[in-house]
Amino acid sequence: DTAVSQTPKYLVTQMGNDKSIKCEQNLGHDTMYWYKQDSKKFLKIMFSYNNKELIINETVPNRFSPKSPDKAHLNLHINSLELGDSAVYFCASSPDPRFTDTQYFGPGTRLTVL
Amino acid sequence: GNSVTQMEGPVTLSEEAFLTINCTYTATGYPSLFWYVQYPGEGLQLLLKATKADDKGSNKGFEATYRKETTSFHLEKGSVQVSDSAVYFCALAYSGAGSYQLTFGKGTKLSVIP
C-alpha cells in the first residue's frame, strides 16, 4: 500500500562511520529524488535519477553517493559521516523529471551523527 | 536564478480564523507553482498546484492563485482547523532546455489552537 518507503526511519551513528539509506517506490514512476531537510526545515534537493540515470547532482559533498539499481529503488550511501550531516533525508518520486508533476515523498529518515 | 520567498513563521491562529501565507517568486520563463504540506513526523505531500498564470489551485479548503503580474502564489483558507497545524512549503518548478529545477521556500509553520 505504501507509495514511497524509506529505511531506516531513524539512524544514529558516530562521526566517521559509513551508512546507507534505502528508498523504494511502487508507483511505477521513472524519476526519484533525495532531499535534505535541515533543523530549520529548509528543504534542498540533492540528487535526481530518471530511469536509473543521474540527471540532477546539486552541490553535495562527494561523500554522498546515490545508487539506483532499478527504477523503483534509489539508495543513498554516505561515507565518513560528519556532524553537519545530521538532518532528515527524504526520498521522493514523480512520473517524469520535469517537476511539473506532483512529487510523492517518503516519510523521511532522521539521521543523527554524534 | 529562481527563488521563492515565503512569509516567516511561526503563525498561530485560533480555530476558524482566516489564513493567508504569502509566497512570492523570482523566475525566468514560465514556472509551475506548488504548495506542499508537512504534518508533524511525516514527509511532504502536495496540497495544490498551478501550472500557468491565473490558474487557481484548490484542495481541502485551501486555495492559491498564480499571479504573474505580482509574481505571487499566496495560500489562503477561510476557516482553519486544528488538524491544519503543519509546515507549509511554497515551491517553484521550472523545466526548459534540458534543465530541471525545483526550489522550495523555507517553510511556514502553522499552529491552530482550539
Image: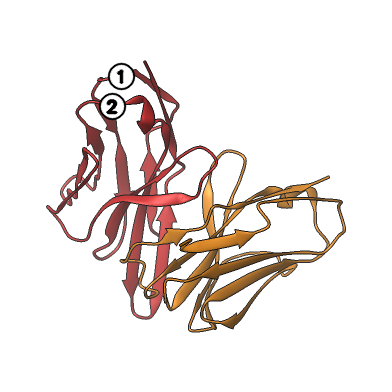
- Chain letter for red, please: B
Q: Which residue is mark 1?
A: B15
Task: Answer with left or right where residue A36 lies relative to residue B6.
Answer: right
Q: Assign a secondary structure to mark 1.
A: loop
Query: Residue A13's x, y, as percent?
Result: 82, 51
Q: Assign a secondary structure to mark 2.
A: loop
Verify CB contact (< 8 Å) between mark 2 and mark 1. yes
Task: Determine the image quadrant of residue A68.
Answer: bottom right
Q: Amino acid at mark 2?
A: Val
Task: Determine the image quadrant of residue A78.
Answer: bottom right
Query: Residue A112's x, y, as percent?
Result: 75, 46
Query: Residue A106's x, y, as percent?
Result: 52, 57
**Image point (19%, 28%), residue name:** B78
Q: Amino acid at mark 1?
A: Glu
Chain A image colour: orange
Relative to A38, residue A52 above or below: below
Q: Determine the chain carrying the residue at label 2.
A: B
Query: Which of the two residues, A93 or A41, is positioned nearer the viewer here?
Result: A93
Q: Residue furthest left?
A: B54
Q: Residues within 10 Å of mark 2 (few under 14, many from 20)?
A: many
Q: Which label's residue is closer to the chain start, 2 or 1?
A: 1
Q: Residue furthest front?
A: A1
Q: CA distance from mark 2 to mark 1?
A: 6 Å
Q: Which dot marks residue B80? A: 2
Task: Answer with left or right where residue B50 lies relative to residue A65.
Answer: left
Q: Which dot marks residue A19? A: none
How many marks on residues? 2
Query: Residue A28's x, y, as percent?
Result: 42, 76
